[in-house]
Amino acid sequence: MAITRKDFLKTLGGLAALTIIPRRVLGGAGHIAPNDQLTKGIIGTGGIGMSNLHFSSDEQCRLVAMCDVDSNHLKRGVELAKSRLGETVNSYHFYRDLINDPNVDIVHIATPPHWHGIMAVEAAKAGKDIFCEKPMTRTIGEGKKVMEAVEQNKRVFRLNTWFRFKDTFYGLGTTVEPLKKLVDSGMLGWPLKVTISGHTGFNWKFFWVGKENLVEQPVPANLDYDLWLGPAPYKPYNEHRTHQTFRGYWDYDGGGLGDMGQHYIDPVQYILGKDHTSPVKVEVDAPQQHHDAIGTWRKITYTYDDGCQIILQGEDHGDPTAPYIEGPLGKVYQGFRCTIPNVMDKLAELPDPEPQNTDFLKCVRTREKFALNEANGFRSSTVVNMGLCALRLNRTLEFDPVKLQFINDDAANALIDQPMRGPWKI
């Protein structure tokens, strides 16, 4: 049973010693003392939510709650919390019960993307900080509402992709920092073209596609399928729609591009200094897509108003000799091979990029923005979703990055704010 502030105060005098007091138990606000133990709850215990990277509990942040609409997943999660972490957690079937749990400081959203927007907005309004898996949202409109809710309610938001601030950047053999320094220096010239392909270490996971003409199957007793669908249109149950293979359907995700795109595109937005804006055009080369099941694509090209481009090479991976970044004055290839002589010596003489806040728990305590937050995360998510709109309609789209609307295209704009199945709404 969740302890309330009133219950806690009644028993506080009987405690001989208490070294760490959860902030939410005391009803605190604003800055959090350095020794306060934060708490978190995970919504979605199927895949990423149960990974070693996130399924944790320690003196900094303790796991106190879990939620899932699949009773088997939830039971396994609760048992693992006990056996692996030594934690007895509150378990919930309905996500709002976890969000409203007074013992939860941080809500970790690890559901399919069609739930990200609703859950993030409700968590922000409930005064919870948010750790959200990528993609940030399934649509541009939902992303805008998440950004607004987080900012209006003064919450701390982290989007879970990290290549703009740590780890070797896929096939380039380097972190993002030297690429950012190189671009900012102007040594490559301007505008720049970035090519993202299998030849530079990017895998779009093309096997994450849907199946056409699914046959209706009985809903397993352990799954609340209606709640799993939530805001998505009702479609008869087939196991391929749910759990690990949901990514292949427009109603829930965006295939390999939807799931992996923000990993690849977000660092490019940062490198190019585009965190405040979006491309003005997206062109797609792909087969005609099925109305329900997502297929593959060959090439997607984004163009910004200053002429910079991001090119996504699809199933044929493009030219294996193409550079990753190229400008009028230089090129960068896989392994950070650069056509500019002595480039590393020159970069060593330049100032490092502005420091980023990369400790999420510290940001929760200090109320500072995390490195990848609701604002820049929304912009990189918008790039992904622009591509998915063009792919779904199979045509070139022009976009207004200020109004956040497609230009003279009603069908494309209808994909920005897609209707939700009642009673769900943001």
Image (cartoon, rainbow, N blue to C red):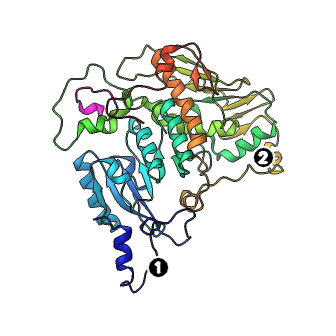
Q: Secondary structure at mark 1?
A: loop
Kindly indicate the quadrant of the structure image that contains residue 192: top right
Report the front residue among 329 and 362.
362
User: Toward which corner of the image does residue 25 lie, by quadrant?
Assistant: bottom left
Q: Is residue 93 above or below residue 88?
A: above
Q: Residue at x 37, y 29 (%)?
A: 420
Mark yes or no: residue 422 visible: yes
Q: Is residue 165 above or below residue 145?
A: below
- The x and y percentages for residue 266 are 59, 38
Whole-percent x and y of residue 327?
A: 76, 28
Q: Is 233 within the magenta?
A: yes
Question: In the depicted view, which residue is nearer to us: 344 or 267?
Answer: 267
Which residue in the rendered view is the most extreme toward the bottom?
16
Q: Residue 19: which numbered mark, if any?
A: 1
Circle on res. 177: none
Q: Is residue 128 magenta?
A: no
User: How many neighbours does mark 2 have within 10 angstroms: few (below 14), some (14-19), or many (20 or more)?
Assistant: few
The residue carrying mark 2 is 344
Prevalent SS, magenta region: loop
Give the secondary structure at mark 2. Answer: helix
Residue 161 shows in this picture: no
Q: Quadrant of the C terminus?
A: top left
- Please report the bounds of the magenta region as a residue range: 231-242
